[in-house]
Amino acid sequence: MTRAIDDSKKESYLLIQFTITATGDVSRFTNWATTIDPGGENWVSTPTIDVTWPNNTGTLSANGCIIKAFTEENATMLALVDLLLGDGAPTPAVEVEIREVIRPVTIGDTATVLIPFRGRLLRAVRNAGGKSKRVRFEVQSIKSRLDIPLGLPCNHHCPWQFMGRGCSVQGGGGQRGPQLIVERRVRSVLAINGKEITVDSDPSLTGSKSFQFGFVERNGVRIGVQDWDPLDPTKLVLRQQPPAEWATPSAVTLVPGCDKTLLACQDDWDNEENFGGIGFAIPAYNPHFEDGS
């Protein structure tokens, strides 16, 4: 028995999955001529969906993926577009996975399933290219989030397949800077002025504790804090304008961030014993990969 991918005659189709990270809800599409249901998963036939992903050159290129579709081709696509573009407000993060199924033409050969792209939805554009009822999804490659590690060395060749078994970099949720979950604070939004929100006063919103690396969250919508002044602690400037319903008033969760330094653990949070970052002293050479001569 041979694999279809090794045959000179073969055909392929795509499976495109959108996952709402906050709820786990998924929308599945295929450019196959008919809807398919492998393993109980319903992949809705969307023949006109167009997908372009970067070539896999074996490097850590952070190029993204473009997905184009007609919004009213089927009810599943229309619901997804309405969710992401309904009122223009920020939405929960959306993870995207593309699978390529290479099926045999010759009876008896086995099909092959590849995953050529994984990433997170960066933006969605309605009426893309001036075409009515056309939507364009721009998906950020998961590789683009590899430039924010805690200073781990990358001067050697990893023996594991990228994002495969054994690889310490996993697909899906991506990476974030450290956040102090134990310091989550639920506060009421008193006012919204553009990207600035005003919340109830709280003892934790004092001193040098920084919210600039943290975020504000409600109902799965998470918006990073762009600026915060300890002298005016109840006001936070967000990176995006929050949804209008946040000011009803409503309760939001504040999560302060961490600048990944030992000094922050010592001075800001008095929590040096739980410091999880990389040491601040760098040896003259890397003993794992260099001989020091």
Image (cartoon, helix red, strand yellow):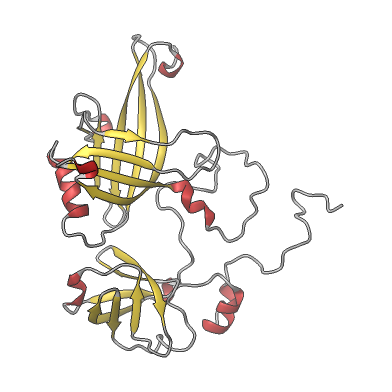
At x 87% / y 52%, what residue is drawn? Answer: 293
Residue pushed farthest top? 106
Quadrant, the N terminus: top left
Q: Is residue 221 among the parts visible in the rendering?
A: yes
Left or right of 273, for residue 254? left
Determine the image quadrant of residue 43: top left
* Rendering coords of residue 197 (x, y %): 28, 79
Front residue of 13 and 23: 13
Left or right of 73, for residue 150? right
At x 50% / y 72%, what residue is drawn? Answer: 258
Residue pushed farthest right? 293
Q: Is residue 135 among the parts visible in the rendering?
A: no
* Rendering coords of residue 253 (x, y %): 31, 74
Above or below 242: residue 123? above
Above or below 105: residue 251? below
Residue pushed farthest front? 130
At x 42% / y 90%, what residue is drawn? Answer: 231
* Rendering coords of residue 252 (x, y %): 27, 75
Q: How many marks?
A: 0
Front residue of 219 and 285: 285
At x 53% / y 54%, what residue is drawn? Answer: 147
* Rendering coords of residue 291 (x, y %): 83, 50
Determine the image quadrant of residue 127: top left
Determine the image quadrant of residue 89: bottom left
Above or below 9: residue 57? below
